[in-house]
Amino acid sequence: MQALTSHRHMQLYGALLLLPAAVLLATFAYLPTISTLINSLFLPGIRGEPPVFVGLENYQVLIQDATFWKVARNNLFYALGTIPTSIALALAMALFVNARLPGRGFVRMAYFTPTVLPMIAAANIWMFFYAPQIGLFNHLLDVVGINGPNWLGDPSVALFSVIMMTIWKEAGFFMIFYLAALQSIPPDLKEAADLEGTGRWSFFWRVTFPLLMPTTLFVMINALINAVRVVDHLFILTKGGPNNATNLLLYYVYENAFSFFDRPYAATITVIILLVLAIVATVKFTVLDRRIHYQ
Amino acid sequence: MTCHRHVTVTHWSSATATILPDILARRSTLVIRRVQAGVGAVSLFAANGRTMLDTLNNDNKRIRLEDVSKVWDGLAAVDQVTFDVSPGEFIILLGPSGCGKSTTLRMISGLEQPSTGRIFIGERDVTRESPGDRGISMVFQSYALFPHLNVADNIVFGLRSRKVPKPERQERLAQVASQVGLEAYLDRKPAQLSGGQRQRVALARAIIAENAICLMDEPLSNLDARLRGDMRREIKALQQRLGMTVIYVTHDQVEAMSMGDRVILMESGRIVQDGTPAELYSRPTSAFAASFIGSPAMNLLELESVAGRTVISEEPAVPIASGDASHCLLGLRPEDIVIQPAGAAGMPARVIDKEYLGADTIVRVRVGNQTLRVRLPGQQSLPNEHCRLDWPAEAAHFFTADSGERRDDITAVTPVMANSRSSISRATAQPFPDQGVKR
């Protein structure tokens, strides 16, 4: 009897320790998720009337919404364009600054600078780079006699321009994770491999890369979340235009909620985004986790 | 020769079980084993036509260092080191931490470039060669196992780098795994192994390459004392069986004495003494060498000259050397000293305390203003305070006080002989009842 109550005591104690985190998570993650889900089942209330329950009608509208599909496709291209490139670039930069080179502290800082800049500020800088006549890129292209495109105004180039900037911004951030992981690999592994005459390339693929897999998985999940979280630099650069050529999911949510004042429709898109993200993250963790070595 | 490789390889544990623990007994059996190992090694590798480890041509097993130095920021970590290693020799680089022994080893392996000097393997100058081209294996202190690869992949890592075809890789893996007793663990990751098993994986990885030379950097320092003793014997037996040239770095004098054919003792980047374990023990060339070998270490006593006689400081009654040796140190091994009752002849001393260790007892005694350790067999009942010490003349070593250099020009006088009050000789001196016969 005594043992039972002391066991209960410990359980209560544990629950109390969890409480602060649980309250925060519930308030800012679970409750909003549930209220979004409920919201997506109503029509917007006009002129103070209460919202009308319509079931899955918003989802039917969504399926028939050509703009949504265009935005979703944009986002897919955006993800495919940014994630592999920024990860590869981050890894390359990390390998570079992890080597012994003069002034590597400075180089590390330089690579990390884009991450420190607020997105709005970075977007403004890139506005100047991309400006059609006076912009840096077209100015440089002019010098070699090429008539540069209208980077943000041409629907066929605009999404690519946004992707470019995202890679520039994200690669430095991911580099920090790779650098930390690289520094945790004991140097004697390289020495042991050197004694066996293992080439650099072979060592990278057989030792370094597998040992970096936990970091790669982490970075991949983060990059994916970032890819559907883009609002701020679209707001500065293109506002989703021209003709929705650069419109991405979360910006579309923002437009629906705060420009068209269709909150339930925005909630519907959000639910879809959450679902897709949850599925992808689950697959990544379950499939890849089995093949990854954690130290 | 039709003999298959497996036939010549005796099982790891059964081979080592025959080795007697006693060092002296082992030394004599080794001669026989070495001959057997030599024969085995020839058939072992001639069978497959690989000539990496070729016992008939020993050229790739010889190592020579000529005036090798390594300077970091103006400080010499290794200072003009020169030595030769004969084929099949087990060489120990011994010294306290920071003496440059590991740096020397890393320069031989090619992981570190010497600042000056040249390194030869056989007749080949390898000073600027990359580590992978030198034909050297190495066992790291940390083992340097690849954490994401299982035991089998760890062992054959180097063979894959050298593009050895898969069937041969498998064959050599099976053979090496049985030699080090890892057959049951090939699928495990290093994290699932005990320290001793990891050590075996590191060893297996070093020997599967069939290189003639194997370097070991404090390979046993992460193991507990008991396992270390077993691994000492196993490594030595493996080296004998494969006929490898081994350079082994350690700060542990027990490993040095028990494993080495030759010990190179280093201090502050320089070689202090280079000789067999017996030479290091019985004829240390400096006070440093004397204090480094032996457990407990050799007693070093300051001497002074009183009325033309050389005596231990503040103990003017008994001279210990003929002639003037006042700026010298007297070195005495704890096991060479005999304790006798206060009434006997010898050096007057006072017992401070004793430490019972099972097989023997370490007694601390005070002579003049200095403390000595005396090692006596078994458990001892000693007089509370006053006693007399004696030691044979050949047990006294003399070193210059400031430079630590050995002095062979001083003739020792035993305390019994010097003590004029008594004529009891060493042969007739009565030991304490339970002291037994000294070695």
Image (cartoon, coloured by chain):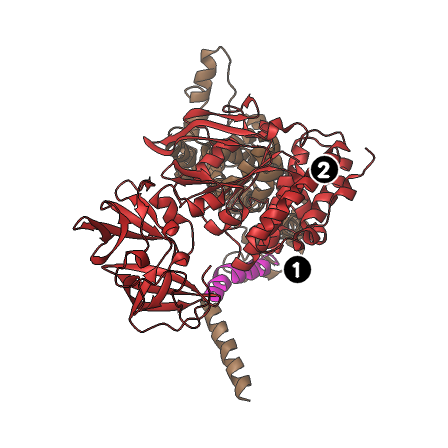
The colour one sees for chain B in the rendered image is red
* Residue B133 visible, this orientation: yes
For disc 1, the marked residue is A55
**Residue type, mark 1 in image:** Gly
Residue B113 x/y as whole percent: 46, 28
Chain letter behind tag 1: A
Q: Write down which chain is painted brown.
A: A
What range of the chain is rendered magenta? Answer: A21-41
**Could you tell me which residue is drawn at 57 percent across and 29 percent down?**
B62
Residue A4, position as x, y percentages in the image: 55, 84
Q: Around disc 2, counting alpha carbons within 10 Å, would you say few (fewer than 14), some (14 to 19), or many (20 or more)? A: some
* Secondary structure found at label 2: helix
Image position of B23 with respect to A93: above or below = below
Q: Main secondary structure of the magenta part?
A: helix
Q: Residue furthest left?
A: B307
The one of B182 and A70 positioned closer to us in this rendering:
B182
The extreme top residue here reads: A145
User: Pointers 1 and 2 in contact (CB under 8 A)?
Assistant: no
Query: Residue B327's x, y, as percent?
Result: 23, 44
Residue A157's tag is none
Question: Residue at 53% of width from left, 55% of height from top?
Answer: B223
Quarter the N terminus of chain B occupies: top right
Q: Residue furthest front?
A: B423
Q: Which residue is mark 2?
A: B39
Is B309 within the magenta?
no
Spot occupied by residue B290 in the image (x, y as percentages of width and height): 38, 47
Say which of B160 and B216 sits in front.
B216
Looking at the rendered image, the disc whose residue lies closer to the viewer, 1 or 2, is 2
Residue A26 is a magenta residue: yes
Cα–Cα span, label 1 and label 2: 88 Å
